Amino acid sequence: MKLSNNKLKFLFNYLKSVGLKKEASLIKGIIKTSYLDYPIEETDIDSKDDLFLYLEENPGELIFLDNPAGTHKKFGNNDKRLPFHYGEFPGLINPADDMGWDIVIVPSYNDAIVDGDLGHVDSGHNLEPIGYVPVNESKEDWANNASKDPPIGNDKIILAPEKKYSESDINSIVDFFSDLWQFNKVRLF
């Protein structure tokens, strides 16, 4: 399987480099499911509170890293280098976008398995929610800046190992999101 993943990652990076974003996204979906060593059943989780409860009862869900620390991610017209791992729970579906719930892992966490622009955190990890980055729900801001309605509920969940983090971890996350109009102030528990 490793050889196949390397070929898929090469194809993903090539398609991305030549501007074939849709095709690269399809390959990324195949790579995401290839990390699983068992079939995954998607579970719809309707709200942040439901997600937090689910994670408390089912800790250590597999995490797919769309953008490991050091890679770039676009938020609207902003293309920013990430100081933290950014990804999703592929089996826990957020109704705001019908994709996995988005996550941010504190920058001090370094146990992720990263290979190029993609990676994952195996199931059984000790990452737990410590807060979230709420989406800006202003219809006016979204109409003016993106010509669409706000993706209400597509908040980014912040995870830390055993809920332990440093002030530096939080400052990095706050600094990153503070100049993005798409988000409101970071909220910690």
Image (cartoon, helix red, strand yellow):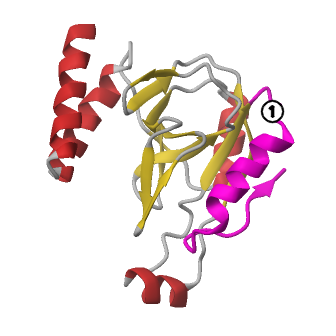
Q: Residue at x 52, y 47 (%)?
A: 101
Q: Position of residue 179 (x, y in %)?
A: 62, 69
Q: Where is residue 50 in the image (x, y as percent from the top left)?
A: 66, 48
Query: Residue 152, relative to residue 87: is it above or below?
Result: below
Q: Which residue is drawn at 67% across and 27% down?
A: 109
Name which quarter of the figure residue 152 lies in. Answer: bottom right
Q: Position of residue 58 (x, y in %)?
A: 65, 27
Q: Give the range drawn in magenta.
A: 161-189
Q: Mark 1 points at which residue?
A: 163
**Mark 1 belongs to which amino acid?**
Lys
Q: Left or right? Give the position of 174 relative to 72.
A: right
Query: Residue 89, relative to residue 188: is it above or below?
Result: above
For label 1, the crowd category at 10 Å Cα-Cα, with few meaning under 14, some 14 to 19 and many 20 or more, is some
Quadrant (top left/top right/bottom left/bottom right) for the N terminus: top left
Q: Where is residue 121 in the image (x, y as percent from the top left)?
A: 53, 23
Q: Residue at x 85, y 43 (%)?
A: 167
